[in-house]
């Protein structure tokens, strides 16, 4: 029984006003003045008309013209609803007292027919505001008033109908008002709409008055207990929110503040004051568009941010913002839409000052641009020097040889030795100039890249080295063309690398066996590794670390045929121009395996191999 009473007391959730009441509601108005009466029934009925409901006013001692006058306030188009029949007023004798007295059965029939008619005419629901002063008369059946009001609580939940019963407190005695309150779950009094914990369900209402009072008292005790628990929970939440507010207020590196639904500022923390320059007193209540440039405000960008945040729940961007002194700073902005039980209540906004990072990025970009320009200049210089030196170096070499061939017998041993050294130095200088020219040509940045099969490049390099391969007796073994991958690369640069790795194996071959190079390919880490394994004696650990350094050789000895720039050029081509990796593996006495790795479809990755 106790659970039944409590359920009855809380079976409806109350809106904030009478116009918020939808179908299935049965509010009661207890009023003292005509103004209180007007302030209640007018918004109640106007809201129903605007929702497409059929509305009826049942009057007793009020003038129908007064009702029409009240309903027409604030330019409400009542005439339209009167003409369509959506609104009408009827006398008590057409409803409650059809036979000159009140009869519960006939009043229930009135409700049934009115509900059916409103549905047939296409209205979404039926809404009625009724004056109850007729119950003060001497007519037979008026003593059934309380029972009638109670039965409506059974009827209304099943039909699209709502009724506002109006009771003039000055004209009804206190006992009747008390009973009226017991049979209405919602009470409108002194401009407030209240949930009624003292309302009693119809099946309980048939018990004795003393029994009903006991049940109402128990119901109130349960409600008071629930309110006490709710109050404790509210205090706990207030304490938590206060602690959170103190935390937010003390944050200095981020501007954190709340906005209402229109973008007006509701709160302000220390970080916001430090970043934007406004004190809380200066900025709270103003629109957050003050932080945007005039151009952004002109194109409604602040409103656009709020619209996106409301639709998607969140908006984030980086862009210029304006401080109090008019200076511009670069900001990261995050706006989050706030909702309470599905209703949008505002926004939370977090701003971070990224000005220093932005300046650092711009400085880095300028530095990179400068370095790129210097690299271009260095390449151009290397190209120019190598081109211009070729002719005098060739002349020096040629004339040295000519002197030795023509005047060898006349100059003496010392002169011949000097000429031989000059000729040798000229040849070395010629090779260095040639390598410098190759370096400038092959590693020139911005070279065009195309999709090329590596097997075709291997075959091309082998053809280029035909003379060297035949003279050295070296054999080059590689898989069929079809087993090599196609990669995006600079064709000329990659041919140079392949040719240099084969040549390197031949130049540094030791032993009685003829040199041999086995080329293979492996798929690794979203890319391809091409390997060049030779049958030489391997590379000494002492010289391994400087293998890719300029003008260094793998055995540390002078080279009559090269300058030591081949592998450094290969390293620049693979790592700088193709975002790849180059290296080698070697065991002394067991040969060496040089390799390079290129990413598949220009995706950058890391090889599993490590240089030894």
Image (spheres, rainbow, N blue to C red):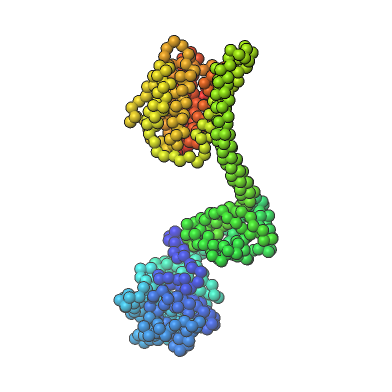
Measured as percent of width and height from the top left, residue 103 is found at 35, 80
Seen in the image, is 334 located left or right of residue 10? Answer: right
Examine the image and state in which quarter residue 601 appears: top left
Examine the image and state in which quarter residue 326 appears: bottom right
Outermost residue toward the top?
A: 512
Nearer to us in this view, 552 or 228: 552
Outermost residue toward the left?
A: 120
The quadrant of the picture occupied by the N terminus is bottom left
Residue at 57% from the left image edge and 57% from the top image edge = 348
Q: Is residue 218 visible?
A: no
Reply above or below: 149 against 486.
below
Nearer to us in this view, 263 or 414: 414
Total numbered labels: 0
Residue at 44% from the left image edge and 31% from the top image edge = 495
Measured as percent of width and height from the top left, residue 175 is found at 50, 76
Residue at 42% from the left image edge and 18% from the top image edge = 471
Measured as percent of width and height from the top left, residue 493 is found at 46, 33
Seen in the image, is 446 located left or right of residue 207? Answer: right
Measured as percent of width and height from the top left, residue 304 is found at 52, 62
Q: Is residue 381 visible?
A: yes
Reply above or below: 427 against 32.
above
Nearer to us in this view, 48 or 445: 445
Residue at 54% from the left image edge and 75% from the top image edge = 191
């Amino acid at each position: 029984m106790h659970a039944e009473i409590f359920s009855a007391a809380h079976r409806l959730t109350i809106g904030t006003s009478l116009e918020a009441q939808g179908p299935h509601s049965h509010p009661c108005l207890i009023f003292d003045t005509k103004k209180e009466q007007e302030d209640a029934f007018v918004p109640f009925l106007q809201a129903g008309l605007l929702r497409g409901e059929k509305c009826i006013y049942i009057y007793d001692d009020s003038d129908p013209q007064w009702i029409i006058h009240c309903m027409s306030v604030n330019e409400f188009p009542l005439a339209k609803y009167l003409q369509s029949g959506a609104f009408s007023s009827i006398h008590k004798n057409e409803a409650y007292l059809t036979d000159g007295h009140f009869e519960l059965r006939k009043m229930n029939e009135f409700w049934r027919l009115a509900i059916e008619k409103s549905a047939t005419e296409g209205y979404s629901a039926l809404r009625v505001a009724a004056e109850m002063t007729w119950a003060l008369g001497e007519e037979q059946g008026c003593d059934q008033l309380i029972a009638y009001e109670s039965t409506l609580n059974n009827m209304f939940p099943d039909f699209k109908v709502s009724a506002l019963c109006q009771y003039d407190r000055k004209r009804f005695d206190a006992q009747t008002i008390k009973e009226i309150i017991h049979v209405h779950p919602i009470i409108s009094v002194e401009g407030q709409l209240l949930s009624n914990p003292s309302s009693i369900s119809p099946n309980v209402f048939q018990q004795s008055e003393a029994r009903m009072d006991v049940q109402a008292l128990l119901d109130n005790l349960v409600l008071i207990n629930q309110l006490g628990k709710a109050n404790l929970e509210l205090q706990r939440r207030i304490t938590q929110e206060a602690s959170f507010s103190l935390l937010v207020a003390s944050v200095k590196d981020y501007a954190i503040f709340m906005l209402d639904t229109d973008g007006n500022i509701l709160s302000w923390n220390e970080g916001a004051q430090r970043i934007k320059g406004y004190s809380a007193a200066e900025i709270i209540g103003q629109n957050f568009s003050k932080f945007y440039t005039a151009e952004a405000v002109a194109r409604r960008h602040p409103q656009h941010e709020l619209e996106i945040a409301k639709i998607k729940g969140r908006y984030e961007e980086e862009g210029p913002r304006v401080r109090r002194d008019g200076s511009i700073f670069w900001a990261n902005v995050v706006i989050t839409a706030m909702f309470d039980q599905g209703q949008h209540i505002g926004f939370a906004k977090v701003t971070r000052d990224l000005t220093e990072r932005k300046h650092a990025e711009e400085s880095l970009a300028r530095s990179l641009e400068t370095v790129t320009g210097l690299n271009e200049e260095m390449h151009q210089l290397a190209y120019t020097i190598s081109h211009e030196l070729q002719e005098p170096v060739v002349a020096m070499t040629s004339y040295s040889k000519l002197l030795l061939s023509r005047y060898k017998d006349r100059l003496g041993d010392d002169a011949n030795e000097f000429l031989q050294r000059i000729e040798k130095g000229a040849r070395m200088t010629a090779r260095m100039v040639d390598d410098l020219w190759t370096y400038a040509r092959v590693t020139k940045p911005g070279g065009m890249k195309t999709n090329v099969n590596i097997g075709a490049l291997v075959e091309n390099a082998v053809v280029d080295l035909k003379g060297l391969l035949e003279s050295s007796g070296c054999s080059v073994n590689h898989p069929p063309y079809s087993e090599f991958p196609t990669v995006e690369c600079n064709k000329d640069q990659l041919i140079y690398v392949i040719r240099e790795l084969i040549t390197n194996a031949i130049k540094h071959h030791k032993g009685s066996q003829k040199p041999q190079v086995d080329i293979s390919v492996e798929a690794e880490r979203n890319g391809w590794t091409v390997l060049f394994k030779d049958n030489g004696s391997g590379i000494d650990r002492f010289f391994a670390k400087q293998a890719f350094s300029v003008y260094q050789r793998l055995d540390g000895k002078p080279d009559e045929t090269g300058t030591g720039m081949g592998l450094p050029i290969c390293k620049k081509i693979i790592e700088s121009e193709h975002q790849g990796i180059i290296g080698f593996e070697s065991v002394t006495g067991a040969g060496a395996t040089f390799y390079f790795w290129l990413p598949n479809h220009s995706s950058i990755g890391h090889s599993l191999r490590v240089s030894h």
